[in-house]
Image (cartoon, rainbow, N blue to C red):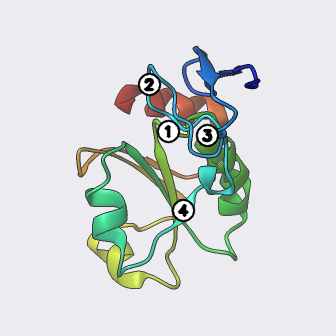
Amino acid sequence: MSETRKTVLCPVCGVANRIDPVRGLETARCGKCGAPLMPSASSGPIEVSDADFPESVLASPLPVLLDLWAPWCGPCRTVGPIIEELAEKYHGRLRAAKMNVDENPYTARELRVASIPTLLFYKGGNEVNRLVGAHPKATIEQYLKMIL
C-alpha cells in the first residue's frame, strides 16, 4: 500500500504542487515557477566577498539585490532585517546578498559606493538601479518588482 501524495503550495507563486512522499520535500520544486518548495536556511541573504562577487552577483541567473553595509552603521542595521524578509519572500525568484564594505573594500570602491547602506539591483549581470540610505520596505520592494 503506497502513501497518498501530499499537496504543498509554492511559497513564490502560490500554485498547489503534489509531492510524492517517497521522494520527499527537500528537493521538490514548483512545477510552474521552479522555486524550491521547502524554504531552507539558505533562503536568506548570502554573504558576498571581493573574491566571489563576479560569480555570486554578476553571473547569477536570478536578479540580485546586493546590500552593501558595515556592522558599525546604524541605518545598515535597520535595513538588514528588511533584506532578510525580502530574501525569504522572493526565494527562488531573487538572490539577496550582503557585502560588508569594511571587509571587502575593493568591490565597494569599484562600485563607487560612497555611503552606506547602499542597495544595488542587478539583472543579467548589470546594475539597473541603486538606493542609497535607509529606505522603508515598501520602497525597496517597489524597486525589486522592477527587476523581477
Question: With 97 as the anchor, is 9 left or right in this view?
Answer: right
Bin the neighbour count of mark 4 within 10 Å (Cα to Cα): few under 14, some 14-19, many 20 and up.
some
Residue 103 image offset from top left, x and y in percent:
51, 85
- Residue at screen point 38% across, 27% down: 146
Instruction: Name which residue type carries label 2.
Output: Cys
Instruction: Name which residue type carries label 1.
Output: Gly
Question: What numbered label is drawn on residue 46?
Answer: 4
- Residue 116 in view in this figure: no
Q: Tags 1 and 2 in contact by the CB under 8 Å rule?
A: yes
Q: Tags 4 and 1 in contact by the CB under 8 Å rule?
A: no
Marks 3, 1: nearer the viewer: 3
Instruction: Name which residue type carries label 4.
Output: Ile
Q: Tags 3 and 2 in contact by the CB under 8 Å rule?
A: no
Tell which circle, 3 or 4, labels the residue nearer the N-terminal end: 3
Q: Tags 3 and 4 in contact by the CB under 8 Å rule?
A: no
Give the secondary structure at mark 3. loop
Question: With 125 as the anchor, is 97 left or right in this view?
Answer: right
104 in relation to 135, above or below: below
- Residue at screen point 50% across, 34% down: 35
Q: Which residue is mark 2?
A: 33
Tell which circle, 2 or 4, labels the residue nearer the N-terminal end: 2
Which quarter of the rendering shows the C terminus?
top left
How far apart are labels 3 and 4 at the CA level?
27 Å
Q: Which residue is mark 3?
A: 23
How far apart are labels 2 and 4 at the CA level?
22 Å
Tell which circle, 4 or 1, labels the residue nearer the N-terminal end: 4
Q: Which residue is mark 1?
A: 92
Give the secondary structure at mark 2. loop
Marks 3, 4: nearer the viewer: 3
Question: What numbered label is drawn on residue 136?
Answer: none
The image quadrant that residue 57 belongs to is bottom left
Closer to us: 99 or 25: 25
